[in-house]
Image: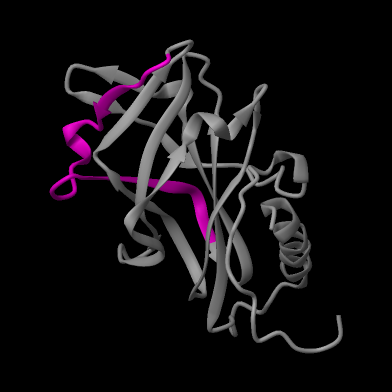
């Protein structure tokens, strides 16, 4: 099933719930959050392969809720998440978290990555800078939202790997990761297509 077909309905649902609002004195107990990845353009590379192990949302008290985890790691070509200067969205996960205000995101990734400069037929192995070290073979990058993000009902978080500001130095790759815009989520042409194999079960009601 193609990603944009799955999430066209999701985006409509998000807007509908968001417009309904809720009383601050009685927020819902849980919030569903969808994690999307995107990238600002960097013409210097044809591919930038990273491996994402975990995505956590940071609460205002400094603790974290896990929104995505994959012990095997999810390989992502960040450079593919931009087409002709327009950001392209890649769905990563949907998770139920505690409703409330969140301050930012922490990404845990494999320390190693692979860079393909423009026109190159083979990649150049690199590592993230030591400042991001988070245990053997891992790097962690944290960024804050521009303002606390209130999650209630169904919400979205867009993680923008701003490759235009990444630098490769003698001690590794220094990165910029920030909150991305969700203004293009309703455009099916701006979703990175993925095929998911599996079985859909426990369906009910009238089609």
The colour scheme used to paint the residues is: one colour
Furthest toward the top, the residue is 119
In the displayed structure, would residue 54 be above or below residue 99?
A: above
Residue in the picture at 65% in, 45% down = 193
In the displayed structure, would residue 8 be above or below residue 200?
A: above
In the displayed structure, would residue 25 be above or below residue 51?
A: below
Observer-nearest of 56 and 4: 4
Observer-nearest of 25 and 112: 112
Left or right position of 175 against 94: left
Residue in the picture at 79% in, 67% down = 16
| Numbered-mark total | 0
Left or right position of 179 against 174: right
Please tell me in which quadrant of the rendered image residue 200 appears: bottom right
Residue range (magenta): 121-149
Residue in the picture at 58% in, 68% down = 198
Observer-nearest of 198 and 177: 198
Percent from the top left, x then y, of residue 94?
54, 65
Residue in the picture at 71% in, 60% down = 6
Percent from the top left, x then y, of residue 29?
53, 84
Q: Is residue 125 magenta?
A: yes
Percent from the top left, x then y, of residue 154?
64, 69
Q: Where's the N terminus, which quadrant?
A: bottom right
Q: Is residue 37 magenta?
A: no
Please tell me in which quadrant of the rendered image residue 167 appears: top left
Percent from the top left, x then y, of residue 143?
39, 45
Q: Where's the C terminus, which quadrant?
A: bottom right
Furthest toward the right, the residue is 206
Furthest toward the left, the residue is 136
In the displayed structure, would residue 143 be above or below residue 207?
A: above
């Amino acid at each position: 099933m193609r990603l944009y077909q799955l999430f066209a309905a999701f985006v409509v649902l998000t807007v509908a719930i968001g417009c309904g609002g809720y009383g601050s004195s009685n927020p819902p107990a849980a919030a569903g959050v969808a994690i999307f990845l995107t990238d600002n353009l960097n013409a210097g590379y044809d591919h930038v392969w990273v491996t994402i192990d975990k995505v956590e949302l940071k609460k205002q008290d400094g603790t974290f809720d896990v929104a995505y985890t994959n012990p095997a790691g999810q390989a992502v070509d960040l450079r593919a998440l931009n087409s002709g200067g327009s950001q392209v969205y890649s769905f990563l996960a949907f998770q139920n978290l505690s409703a409330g205000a969140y301050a930012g995101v922490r990404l845990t990734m494999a320390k190693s990555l692979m860079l393909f400069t423009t026109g190159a037929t083979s990649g150049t192995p690199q590592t993230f800078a030591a400042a991001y070290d988070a245990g053997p073979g891992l790097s962690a990058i944290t960024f804050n939202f521009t303002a606390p993000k209130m999650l209630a009902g169904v919400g979205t978080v867009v993680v923008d790997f701003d490759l235009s500001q990444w630098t490769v130095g003698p001690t590794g790759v220094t990165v910029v990761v920030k909150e991305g815009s969700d203004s293009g989520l309703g455009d099916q042409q701006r979703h990175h297509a993925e095929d998911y194999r599996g079985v859909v079960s426990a369906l009910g009601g009238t089609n």
